[in-house]
Image: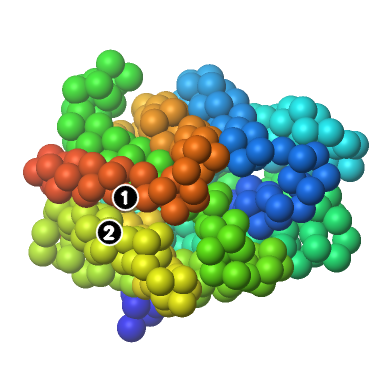
Amino acid sequence: MPTSTLFRRARWSPAAGTLALLIGLNLLNYIDRYILPGEVSLVQNEFHSTDQQMGALTTALFVVYMLAAPLTGWLGDRFRRKPLIVGGAVLWCLATLATAWVHDYWTLFIRHALVGVGEATFGIFAPAVLADFYPERDRNRVLSIFYLAIPVGAALGYLAGGEIGSVWGWRAPFFICALPGLAIAVLYGWLGREPERGASDHVQATPNRSTVSGLFRNPAFLTATFGLATLTFAMGGISNWMPTFLHRFAGLSVGKAGLAVGAITVVDGIAGTLTGGWLAQRWLQTNDRALYLVSFWSVALTLPCGVLVFFGPSTWALPALLVTEFFLFLNTGPLNAAIVNSVSAPVRATAISMNLFCIHAFGDTFSPTIIGAISDKTNLRIGLGATLIFLVISATILLVGARFAPKLDKIETASSGATQ
């Protein structure tokens, strides 16, 4: 079964304990990120904001996120990552608590932007830390587990925004992340471990894989990065506007729209992420290109389903969304593992920060605003339909990228890594 392969050798160890704590931080991060999309209409009712202004809040977060990413990546390749993760988590939690003092649109804009500074730390360092615990062939399995926090956190964020926001006001849901986040940051500072850099690397560290300048000549890294960037444009726009789309075109209330998207996201996110990770893990036994090919098929199969969601009858919206998100989540573990495996330890944090800069600069930083602007001029169906173009581009890049997948060795035992 998929889960048996993904979770094999699970035991308490420095690697497993660190993984568990980083999953906790990542989960709370995504809950916080998706609260706002679940309660857009509630915020608009208070601040009388346009769709474009609401999309700009997500843009603000990601602009700060991607501008901070290069610096944090540079720091992560030169200093211990553990204190950097703790500091970033504390900053993010304090910015989230500041929601209590938000009473106008522009204060919310600034608050949302500051959250991006904290996210630009553990979002970059966590995959690099995990890569130093586990060898190349195990990273897809481990990252598939780590990134389960995305659908689960997104679902809980939608639910919190729609349900708690409708009852207690739109500010209340943000407080469910801040205090637990501080607690996990303290636990990570106490129990988390710092693995030796490169302890689990087995692919040769060529200049293209182990130097910053080499990243710009590394086709495996570049195709995975830009394939994910164009995919992120679509995913960011869809995730930000789907509850509002269901409210407007499927006749659901704000609370029910958030509940529906949250339920679909958590079910499909878990099922799709585990299935995609399992398929890639099996395929890797015979084909080193599997991480790219599973990602390609994930995007290609999403396309026709997305057409039904946006342009089909309103009664088809929810069933079509259920199928669409399942296919969309198949690539989560494989594509992130492809990025981590495309580089070596000396520049891994820098590479991840460059990847995050690109996927947000060319992806979800501007897609919610662009979709909102198109919606203001036409309607939200047309706005969301623009994401289909980017899915086509993503599938093409990933298919080309399969040609450049690194040759992996046959070592399949997870490494616990030396700890500092």
Q: Residue furthest top?
A: 213
Q: How is the image coloured?
A: rainbow
Q: Residue furthest bottom?
A: 1
Mark 2 = which residue? 303
Q: How many marks?
A: 2
State which tag comes first along the sequence, 1 or 2. 2
Quarter-of-image position of residue 161:
bottom right
Is residue 48 visible in this depiction of the protein?
yes
Give the left or right position of residue 60, taking residue 333 as reference.
right
Looking at the image, which residue is at 22% across and 37% down? 223
Quarter-of-image position of residue 306:
bottom left
Looking at the image, which residue is at 46% across and 63% down? 145
Which of the two residues, 277 or 98, is positioned nearer the viewer here?
Answer: 98
Mark 1 to mark 2 CA distance (whole Å) = 6 Å
* Local SS, label 1: helix
Q: Position of residue 110 (x, y in %)?
A: 74, 28
Q: Position of residue 232 (x, y in %)?
A: 40, 44
Give the left or right position of residue 174, taking residue 211 as reference.
right
* Local SS, label 2: helix
Looking at the image, which residue is at 84% across and 33% down? 104
Q: Position of residue 345 (x, y in %)?
A: 36, 34
Q: Type of residue at label 2?
A: Leu
Quadrant the N terminus occupies: bottom left
Q: Are marks 1 and 2 in contact (CB under 8 Å)?
A: yes
Is residue 6 visible in this depiction of the protein?
no
26 in relation to 298, above or below: above
Which of the two residues, 110 or 198, is positioned nearer the viewer here?
Answer: 110
Mark 1 = which residue? 388
Which of the two residues, 74 or 363, is positioned nearer the viewer here?
Answer: 363
